[in-house]
Amino acid sequence: MLRAFPVTPDIGKSLAQASWIDLVDPTPAETAAFEKAFDLRVPTKEELSEIETTSRLQVDHGALYMTTPVIIATGDVPWIAAPTGFVLSKKVLLTVRFVQSTIFNSVSKDFNAERLEPAQAYVCVLEELVDHMADLLEASSQALDDASHVIFRQENLQRLSRESSLLRQLLVRTGRTSERMARLNYTLVCLDRMAKFTIERAREWLGGDQISRLQSVSADIASLEQYAEGIVNRIQLLQDAATGIINVAQNEVMKILTIASVAGIPPVLIAGIYGMNFKNMPELNWVWGYPFALFLIVLTTLLPLIWFKWKNWI
């Protein structure tokens, strides 16, 4: 799909007059139309997926070729890092992507009826992307607040065994958040490189306002990176806490089993001794032999329990 801004009734005849071209999963015909109108090449999907900095930031025939992954997040669907390309020249801004994104749609609404400078459109898109990253960080922070409330609530101390399943689910959720933070942080790094690269290579034909706004974008990204780092630290803390609480619950179970086994050994030993039925056992014909054995069994069961209680182990 090819979209040209500002929007005109006949895009085909006025394509060269557009200041911003947005290509979404372009067809060969749309790619050829852009290249013919502006004498600039359209990056392929394979080129947009390159991870080397030299591949992501290039200058070719006076135009800046830049790529970055853009986070696509919708509800509970796993985040997608969609490769996105930017080609910025004095005459036009080209954005190339292969996944639909509301970010570009929201920017285009502001420029449907007026002509804008390519650099202005480029800065607006970057600002919208940074705002989108900030929204995702805020949502992730809120999710961690909810997880923290569940992990550290006082009721966990009374019902650890029943909370273990919930804590395991929280571990999975925080693990996914950690993976999302890694993707988001990489996107922020790429956006910061793009902003600085644009200032460095296009300073001669960028307006002072655009340079100032790009510097602000870079400063906002730096603050978001610090915020993301704090979220990553919180994730590690919550994962350690959830793992620790699960371990405590397992240790409680093991402690109960250990106490039961220790308290059960003496009675079993006594019952085993008096259950051998040898002919010359003195207690075999004793009238009080059975009550005496029962008394020993009860006594040897209670003594370990009293000892554990005195030591405050139970």
Image: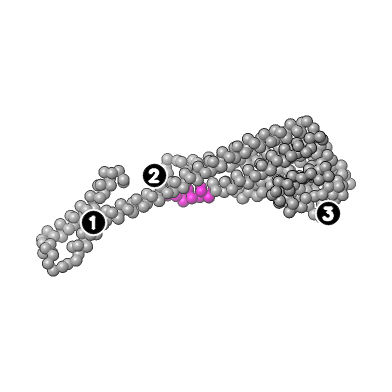
* Residue identifier under label 3: 29
The residues colored magenta run 161-173
Which is nearer the N-term, disc 2 or disc 3?
3
The image shows residue 229 at horizontal and vertical percentages of: 58, 40
Give the distance between the C-alpha atoms of the residues marked 2 and 1, in whole angstroms: 31 Å
Residue 158 numbered mark, or none: 2
Asked whether disc 2 touches disc 3, contact meaning CB atoms under 8 Å apart, the reply is: no
Q: Residue furthest right?
A: 13
What residue is rendered at 12% in x and 67% in y?
280
Residue at x 74% of width, y 39% of height? 197
Which label sits on residue 266? Answer: 1
- Relative to 219, residue 78 above or below: below
Residue type at mark 2 is Gln
How far across and down, in percent of the image, does residue 17 sit? 87, 42
Q: Residue at x 80, y 39 (%)?
A: 118
What's the residue type where badge 1 is placed?
A: Pro
**What whole-number distance in Å separates the C-alpha atoms at marks 2 and 3?**
67 Å
Q: Main secondary structure of the magenta part?
A: helix
User: In what element is the residue under mark 3?
Assistant: helix
Q: Is residue 269 left or right of residue 65?
A: left
Q: Position of residue 190 (x, y in %)?
A: 69, 43
